[in-house]
Amino acid sequence: MMRSIHRPSGMSLLEVVAAVVIASMLAVAGFSLMRDQSEVAHERICEGHRTALQSDAELYQRETGRWPGGTLAELATSDYTGTILPRCPMAPQGTTSNYRLVRERVVCQFHP
């Protein structure tokens, strides 16, 4: 009579390693997709801030006959942007507005 060989149930070490590698690759791909969407959202928010500030700078120029200073501090009134200038979402917390007026265009140091 032949003896049957008993195979232990469960996964071998090689199968476990392969499963962990595949799961890690899927996780990295998922995180990169989420990161890309976050960057797109930050760029769009920044673009909205720049557009609003550009409109306010042009209005300021029409009303006063001159452009606001490079830091746009003159726009921080209730007549324009409000008392606090917006910040790019990429700017560090607690900093002032990173938007500047360069050759009559509002620019961001993080999103050229």
Image: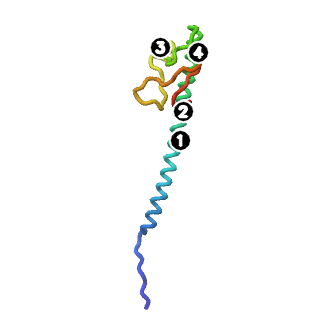
Marks 4 & 2, CB-CB < 8 Å contact: no
Task: Give whichever of 36, 107 is nearer the camera.
Answer: 107
What number of labels is visible? Answer: 4
In this view, the residue farthest toward the bottom is: 1
Task: Give whichever of 18, 10 is nearer the camera.
Answer: 18
Look at mark 3 in the image and give the residue it sits on. 77
Q: Does label 2 or label 1 sit earlier along the sequence?
A: 1
Marks 3 & 4, CB-CB < 8 Å contact: no
What kind of element bears circle 3? loop
What kind of element bears circle 4? helix
Q: Position of residue 30 (x, y in %)?
A: 50, 48
Q: How is the image coloured?
A: rainbow
Look at mark 4 in the image and give the residue it sits on. 58
Q: Does label 3 or label 4 sit earlier along the sequence?
A: 4
What kind of element bears circle 2? helix
Marks 4 & 1, CB-CB < 8 Å contact: no
Q: Does label 4 or label 2 sit earlier along the sequence?
A: 2
- At label 2, counting other C-alpha atoms closer than 10 Å, the crowd grade (few under 14, some 14-19, many 20 or more) is some
Checking the image for residue 43, the label placed there is 2
**For the residues marked 1 and 3, what is the alpha-carbon distance in whole angstroms?**
35 Å
Marks 2 & 3, CB-CB < 8 Å contact: no
Residue at the (41%, 72%) spot, across then down = 9
Marks 1 & 3, CB-CB < 8 Å contact: no
Residue at the (51%, 33%) spot, across then down = 42
What kind of element bears circle 1? helix
Q: Position of residue 73 (x, y in %)?
A: 48, 16
Amino acid type of disc 2? Answer: Glu
Q: Does label 1 or label 3 sit earlier along the sequence?
A: 1
Task: Give whichever of 94, 22 is nearer the camera.
Answer: 94
Look at mark 1 in the image and give the residue it sits on. 36
- At label 3, counting other C-alpha atoms closer than 10 Å, the crowd grade (few under 14, some 14-19, many 20 or more) is few
